[in-house]
Image (cartoon, helix red, strand yellow):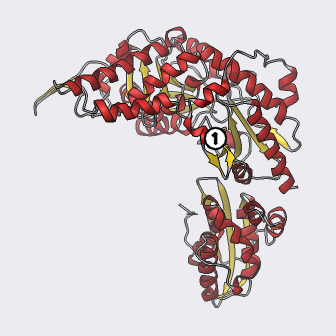
Amino acid sequence: MSYLDDLYQEIILDHSKKPRNFKELSDANHKADGYNPLCGDKVSVYLKLEDGFVEDISFMGSGCAISTASASLMTQTLKGKSLGEIETLFKNFHNLVTGKSSASTELGKLAVFHGVSQFPVRVKCATLVWHTLQAAIKSKPETVSTE
Amino acid sequence: MRTGQQIIASGRYQTLNPWLEVEKIREDFPIFKEKIYGKPLVYLDNAATTQKPQSVIDATIHFYSRDNSNIHRGVHLLSQRATEAYEHARVKVQRFLNAAESREIIFVRSVTEAINLVAQTYGRKHVEAGDEVLISAMEHHSNIVPWQMLCEEKGAALRVIPINDDGELLLEEYEKLLNSQTRLVAVVHLSNALGTINPVKEIIEMAHQWKVPVLVDGAQAAAHLEVDVQDLDCDFYAFSGHKLYGPTGVGILYGKADLLDSLPPYQGGGDMIRSVTFEKTIYNVLPYKFEAGTPNVAGGIGLGVAIDYVNEIGLSNIAAYENELLSYATEQLCGIPRLRFIGTAHQKASVLSFVIEGVHAHDVGTILDQEGIAVRTGHHCAQPVMARFQVPATARASVAFYNTRDEIDVLVKAIHKVIEVFK
């Protein structure tokens, strides 16, 4: 498989064309906006946290295939997860897309992003939504940025 | 908005087929020996920066190996050689722009610095509360932000000349915007995001009827169009060395001598003074008044050599060849399904900006990169242009005289691959 096929795997293309949980969450109690000034990707994460667990999560925004698929798959993965689990997942995900380690089992479908590690300039596309999620958890009032 | 077919049907591009030995020219540029992922480099990002011929690279090496010293200071031989080479480069720039005098040529770092210089000198002196500065809707951030900063400081207003769906300036709207409060017009000669060539001579003439000076941002134009500042009658003209096959870190501001003379200095420091006491400083004459501190000497000399190189081929030959190549590229690309051009002006040069329906520009860029093709993807430091055309980003191929039809064919094939991946 070429690096390109590795990057644009079927599941990533599918989620970029038909993003899941792509909506505003009316009963969200946490929200943050993310922006990558380099490429103009924008994402908003809506989060409903109950007792430290993700009851519901969604996102809105516009971006490239990698950032859209990353957001879509992240929201799917995180439903029902605890804040502690999210922290571990982000760490593992970050290590995966930066090529520092291979996919751990708990990453599940997110392992599909391993191809990003061959494209250093695209790492920020994959992690923008995660940084925004972190800001949402902390409920920072300002827009977060990957810069 | 015009489609690609309409552009071609209008007969705007003529097949001139000028005699240009492109294969031989390419040998002057060592970078074309580079392989990208094992493939030949197809460099179509000339609007971002151009590649450097060996003569420019050699001139930089020669300076640091043989002549390196500071200029305008020492009585020693090296300083004399360095000063002479640097000042000779200034004369080359003067002739390149057909400026009346070499003291009208100010060395700066970049077009960005040139525009900031004018904003900080002309702007600070002449723009007051209630005044207006006029720019266009297709400006690069570097010709927006310095004026925004000035207007904010002074309580002046920034007015914007609108453009049509083809990316052409609306001159009748421009005419309406000119008034007795207008203090300066700042417009781009050749748009980096759209490829539009603006009718700057007409724009200048109209501004002068109101006695309003005009700054022309020639960052893109200098490498693709013949520029004659006296014929244009522009008050300021700025271009950068690295977009003209020269080194980075050197740019030029041309200004009419009388106007420059009347302005306060830009930065204070060495070289821009005639005498300094703690009570009073007397400023130096043009052009040194605006050149505080040790400049990019090697860069200036390198720019002079780049101008020699361009002159040898001839800008009219370059323009004719590039026009033909742009025509070919437009024709090839317009047949691709889901591809839409952004920027379809009647007068264009070098730049083909496009979007592919359902594919983000960055994904286009990544796939093209894997084929060895360098294009720019993003907002091109022209976010208001992206907003005007309601796209988050575009992919931009920009040609130079060392590009070939074969390279355009490689581009077209790669775009088909993009569409295949994102079917």
Q: Quadrant of residue B85?
A: top left
Q: Quadrant of residue B374?
A: top right
The outermost residue toward the bottom is A51
Compare residues B312 and A67 and report the one nearer the observer.
B312
Image-based side of A38 in relation to A50, left or right: left
In which quadrant will I find the N terminus of chain B? top right
Is residue A54 visible to us here? Answer: yes
- In the image, residue B174 above or below residue B381: above
Image-based side of A9 in relation to B291, left or right: right
- Residue picked out by circle 1: B384
Q: Residue A58: where, in percent of width, then height?
A: 74, 73
Element class at badge 1 = helix
Q: Quadrant of residue A86?
A: bottom right
Q: Residue B295: where, in percent of width, then height?
A: 32, 33
- In the image, residue B87 above or below residue B49: above
Q: Residue A60: where, in percent of width, then height?
A: 73, 65
In which quadrant will I find the C terminus of chain B? bottom right
User: Mark 1 packing: few (<14 Cα in 10 Å), some, or many (20+)?
Assistant: some
